Image (cartoon, rainbow, N blue to C red):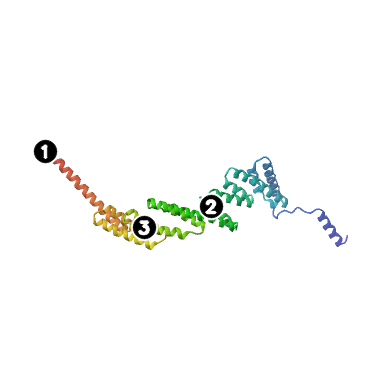
Amino acid sequence: MNKTKFIFVVLALAAMNPPVVFADGCPDKEIAAETLKMKKAEDSEKAGKLKEAFNTASTVAWECLGNEAGKRREALIKRVGRTLGDQEEKQGRLKEAFGWYQASGLEADADRVMLKQANAKPDDTNAVGGAIDHFKRRNNEARVKELRGLASRNVDKWLAAEEKAFAARKESREELGKARDWVYYAGTGSAKVTERAEKRGDTLAADSARRSIENAIAYYEFAEKPQKAKGVRDKARKLGDEHASKGENKLAVQFYELAGDSAKAESLAKKSEAESEKAETKRQDKFKQDQKSLEKELGL
């Protein structure tokens, strides 16, 4: 047989018996193990053990079994994942449903449930914020814009709540904090929140009550207005001096603390404590003296 004829025969035989292509580096032992694992996943699905089937199939190294096995594995994961996700969704466990859909590669269902969860909890920053982050990763600008609009409405809602709270009790930092949380997801509204905090600081800074001074500083710090906060601390120091001159040491110490003047506060506190101890000693001495006088009168 000449060389050309021999090569032709070899090629013909190869064509009649094409080899099964496996990934490089998969020994027979590993192929057998992955084959058994795939069968176990399929048997678990048939037995209704869906989570077991999903978890087992997810660990199958399909590249060692060839393309056909890979398609079977992918189909099983999507089929079982859809069923498990649907079960969770019907029970209202949307977070869990999303997890199954996403893990199964069912992107459209994952998107749908993520949006459903955000709309079900429009006041929850985790739900809405999580949805915004999800759709940003998916490059779905339309959904991101829609959800940012929802977040923006929550900014306005908390600013309205802040207005009522401040009118009622001159304290509304919790509501402002909620508004600021939503600003992060809305991507807008930061200036409105900051201006509101500064406005509250201005109102309170005009008062000389300790609580008003304390809150004014807090509002200015919230609004990131360090110079205005410093101005109120200077006022607190002066008020401390005024109360100290009147002998109102306890109140003076509180103002010095608000001013950040720990040295003056500590010094006056020690002085006040020493005076209190001296007064107490004097009181006790007088009590003892009065007691002796009474005993003498009674002839005791």
Q: Residue at x 18, y 43 (%)?
A: 287
Q: Is residue 50 visible?
A: yes
Which amino acid type is shown beneath numbered disc 1?
Answer: Glu
- Looking at the image, residue 3 sits to the left or right of residue 208; the answer is right
Q: Report helix, strand or loop for mark 3.
A: helix
Name the secondary structure under disc 2: helix
Residue 18, by quadrant, is: bottom right
Observer able to see residue 171:
no
Residue plotted at (73% across, 51% down)? 68
Left or right: 144 with respect to 230?
A: right
Q: Looking at the rendered structure, which numbered label has been put on residue 297? A: 1
Q: Residues within 10 Å of mark 1 (few under 14, many from 20)?
A: few
Mark 2 — residue? 128
Q: Tag 2: Cα neighbours inside 10 Å, few (<14), some, or many (≥20)?
A: many
Q: Mark 1 and mark 2 in contact? Answer it, CB < 8 Å.
A: no
* 87 versus 196 height, above or below: above
Q: Sequence-wise, which precedes: disc 3 or disc 1?
A: 3
Which residue corresponds to mark 3?
203
| In this rendering, the label closer to the viewer, 3 or 2 | 3
List x then y, in percent, for residue 208: 31, 56
Amino acid found under the numbered disc labelled 2: Val
**Residue shown at 42% from the left, 51% from the top:** 164
Viewer-proximal residue, 150 or 184? 150
| Disc 3 and disc 2 in contact, CB within 8 angstroms | no
Q: Secondary structure at mark 1?
A: helix
Numbered mark located on residue 84 in the image? none
Q: Position of residue 97 (x, y in %)?
A: 60, 47
Residue lying furthest bottom: 227
Q: CA distance from mark 3 to mark 1?
A: 64 Å
* Above or below 245: residue 283: above
Q: Which sits earlier in the primary sequence, circle 1 or circle 2? A: 2
Callout 3, which amino acid? Thr
